[in-house]
Image (tube, rainbow, N blue to C red):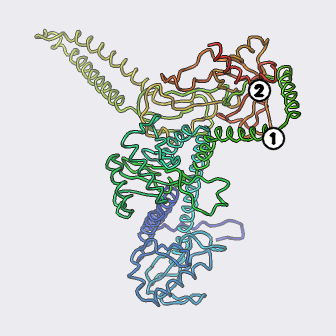
Amino acid sequence: MSGQHGYTEKMPATPRHPSIDSGWQQLEDFMDQLHQSARAPIERTGFYQQLLNDCVTTLAAVGGAVWLPTPQGRWELCYQINLDQVVDRKDADTASAHQALLHSALTTNEPQLFLPRSGAASSSTNPTDAVLVLGAVGATSGGKPPALIELFMRTGSSPATERGWQELLNSVCGAAAEFHVYEELRTLQAEHGLHEQSLALLRRVHRSTDLGQTALEIANEGRRFVDGDRLSIVWRRGKKWHHLAASGVDRLEVRSDASKQLEQLAERIASWDEPLDYHGSTAEELPGELAELLERYVDASHARRLVAVPITLATSEDDARPEHKRPELVLIAELFGIQGKEFSCQRVVELAALCEPAFRQAVWLNRFPLRTTLRWADRWARWTQSWGITRAGLLAVTFVTAVAALSLVQTDFEIEAPATLVPLVERDVFATTSGTVREVHTQHGTDVKPGDVLAVLEDPQLALEIERVQGESATVRERLDAIAAVRTDRRVREEKPDGRLPLSAESQQLEKQLASLMKQQEILEQLRAALTIRSPIAGKVITLDVQNLLRARPVERGQILFTVADPTAGWRLEAEVPQDRVGHVLAAQRDAQSGLPVRFRLAGELEQTFDGHLESVSATTVMAGMDLELDPQAVQARIVVDASQLPAARPGMSAQVRIACGRRSLGYVWLHDVWETLYSWWSF
């Protein structure tokens, strides 16, 4: 007590009962486990099942239920414990009153407690014989919560105990709201990954304007997009269907039985004009002829699942045509083994929507040269027939003037080539040994320092070898210790060995064996250290999707696992100069006293042109294969650029460069392709 002299008498602390401490510890453990589950990537039903089971166990409740909202404004049961023992859902009045009670629990942000057979301020009643504690997950003002938690408690508890129930349920609802936040975050991350994968797919399929190459890119990249085993493209040209491309195959055997069956199946699917999802029993629901063709093809290909999507190539004139267009393309995705993670009919439909513009452009460009030539030939015939003698003379003067201008007027002669922007400092990180990737510690775009761990490999055979060497070393050491102990015995020293090596000789032999084992262990430890892959330089990891590409995958020694680049060290362009143009570049380089000037434009920068100069031209080129009909490989050329001019530079950006090769006549600049072709015909 406080006296007049300003001191306070300390009262002895009241000891708490051990059961109270154990109860608080149980509540703390329950909340810790609940928060950990809220951050774990589990399904919503599994989370609420674990939450409700732990709540009922911790509070010794009669039961409980978790309710989820429906679009119709009612509450749908997600998981329950002893709900039928508390609420008679077969009774319409009881079920209606219970639903009204659930809606009344949303009037406040705090959990509410309803006594048995009692009413609330909202005139909703508790139709049960248990104490109901209701709490909404998340804020209730301005919108419906994602879930509602209901606990069935026993009657006869004190008001303090009932307040404790409400406080605990409030904490549980907060943890459940945290689970929904993390669930939405994982959903957004998955959508972002799909968005990035779609962008990468679009960049690849739009890279080529050739019809066959575009189809091959769609087949190969689309197979990864849908996570299937094979993706085939069948195209209708006129009235016939042609097997155009298949994933993993550069050259098709179009006369094979498999290709013929696939073309017949694609024709029937295009006539049906609906996506087809076959997984064994669905063939019975299809039209008779289509089902027969499908069963015949599946028996030959051994596909466990097949998804086919017909595509109609739209044009700018299609909106004005009322008649229905027939599909011109069919994507057929097949699965032979275990079900892919992303493989579904919807995934193939999304792929068809993404690739339709690229294929439409390739088909249009495939017909472009012939149509343009015929159109201009018709115009030229009509124009010359309508001209007379005077106009013919004027035409001749104009022609002579044009020829003179093409021969005498000088202009800049430039060689155009595609290029790729790459950092000056770029290192490939190789697998130092063969094994399986156990951990990947980085991802695309991560900043790393020299020595940072990028991945960890595992080699079971190496681990077994280390255990063997350690076991043999331990055995040898024990034998040496035994020999040392025996040699201290006087009687043993006086006895002569009977047909065995002297102890000193055996000791020397074991010491040599131990030294050999220690050397083996040192080498094995070096091999174990090599299983940790580290960054050689500071920079960014520019390898795409390294988590899915490497995790749990077997790798071989020398295989490239990562690429690390330093964007701050500068940039250069790697151009691919066609072989029939590289002669002009080399000739201009010999005549120039310094590097040839280069101007270039990055992809997406349509209004800005940058300058650089040619650094070097590769002295060799690599043949793509033994097929002489293939186009020759381009010659690599390096171009130095000013990094300060490229504020938005990214590794791998495509560019179009023009290398200045001096000045030539206007006619040569415009028509040098035709001139060189005619000259080669005449001279060779």
Q: Looking at the image, which residue sits at the far front?
A: 389
Q: Secondary structure at mark 1?
A: loop
Q: Position of residue 584 (x, y in %)?
A: 71, 17
Real-space Cα separation, disc 1 to disc 2, in angstroms: 29 Å
Q: Which residue is mark 2?
A: 670
Q: Secondary structure at mark 2?
A: helix
Towards the viewer: 508 or 416: 416
524 sits left or right of 348 in the view = left
- Are there few (<14), some (14-19), or many (20+) residues within 10 Å of tag 2? few
Towards the viewer: 217 or 124: 217
Q: Which residue is mark 1?
A: 386
Number of the label disc, if any, that sits on residue 136: none
Towards the viewer: 76 or 502: 76
What residue sits 73% from the left and 20% below the top? 614
Between tags 1 and 2, which lies in front?
1
Residue 445 is at least partly visible in this image = no
32 sits left or right of 599 in the view = left
666 sits left or right of 682 in the view = right
Residue 684 is at least partly visible in this image = yes
Tell me which amino acid carries mark 2: Trp
